[in-house]
Image (cartoon, grey):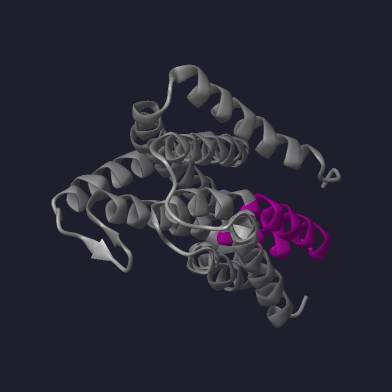
Amino acid sequence: MDLGLVFLAALATALATGLGALPFALAGTGRIGAGRLALGNAAAAGLMLAATGMLAWEGAVIGPVAAALGGLAGLAFIKLSDTILARFENLDIGALTGSDARRALLIVGVMTLHSAAEGIGVGVAFGDGAPLGWFVAMAMAIHNIPEGLAISLVLVPRGVSWRAAAWWSVFSSLPQPLLAVPAYLSVVWFRPLLPAGLGFAAGAMAWMACADMLPEARAGAPAWQVLGVLALSVAGMLGLFALLPEG
Ligand SMILES: [Zn+2]
């Protein structure tokens, strides 16, 4: 397997993340009301929780103890980042200020970190043989689209353009091509890191969804709506994966 091809496959999966912003390109952008913003948060939380479940499962199948320890480290890490970011009250990034900027930074940061673990997964899979590598790369590309949607659901309603949201989505997946290559070159070295990395990613995403996005959603919309949207987005993400052929 050519090294350049591994890089290109992982780069293509990263570009797929940008497709998540497409619904906003079609629907138009601009700030929306508090109720819809709340439901956008609920939908993003559902997509992330479904992804969390899949990451935790994959990690636990390879190495349960490492995955569990990685998960705890992920929770601790994101809690710490959140606490540190909360100190910067006058944070502003582009069109975003204050708590909007903090939330934007947090979701792009968490998604970027978690895709590092997935990049290792893609590289290790190619190391185990081209057919498995292609399968994992394709699964990852499909998995990335709703993650781009989750990022866009947080950014666009707060005033970021859909184009910028698409680029931030792609940015959040750039660790995939960057880490797939070394992981492919040194499967022996990277394989033991995989369950811990997947656990770490799951822990960080679970914290972000439960401690940040769901309370925010609950503050702006009634519980039945939040739970309904949450359940639908979890089901949508899992349904997407059910469509994949057996690998
Ligand atoms: Zn992911």
Query: Residue 178, relative to residue 217: is it above or below?
Result: below
Image: magenta residue range: 119-145
Nearer to us in this view, 22 or 204: 22
Question: Which residue of the protein is positioned furthest toward the top in this rendering?
Answer: 224
Name the spot of residue 44 as percent of width and height, x first. Answer: 51, 41
Nearer to us in this view, 135 or 40: 40
Query: Splitting the image into 4 quarters, where does residue 166 fall?
Result: bottom right
Name the spot of residue 108 as percent of width and height, x first. Answer: 42, 57
Q: Residue at x 73, y 77 (%)?
A: 5
- Where is the N terminus found, in terms of image quarters? bottom right
Nearer to us in this view, 34 or 110: 34
Q: Residue at x 49, y 34 (%)?
A: 39
Residue 140 shown left or right of residue 192 in the figure:
right
Query: Residue 48, relative to residue 100: is it above or below?
Result: above
Q: Residue at x 47, y 38 (%)?
A: 36
Residue 4 shown left or right of residue 88 in the figure:
right
Query: Splitting the image into 4 quarters, where does residue 91 fall?
Result: bottom left
Q: Is residue 123 magenta?
A: yes
Residue 193 visible within the image? no
Residue 25 visible within the image? yes
The majority secondary structure of the magenta stretch comes to helix
Name the spot of residue 144 as percent of width and height, x first. Answer: 62, 55
Question: Which residue of the protein is positioned furthest toward the right in this rendering?
Answer: 245
Q: Is residue 197 magenta?
A: no
Q: Residue at x 51, y 67 (%)?
A: 175
Query: Splitting the image into 4 quarters, where does residue 187 fall?
Result: bottom right
Residue 208 shown left or right of residue 97 in the figure:
right
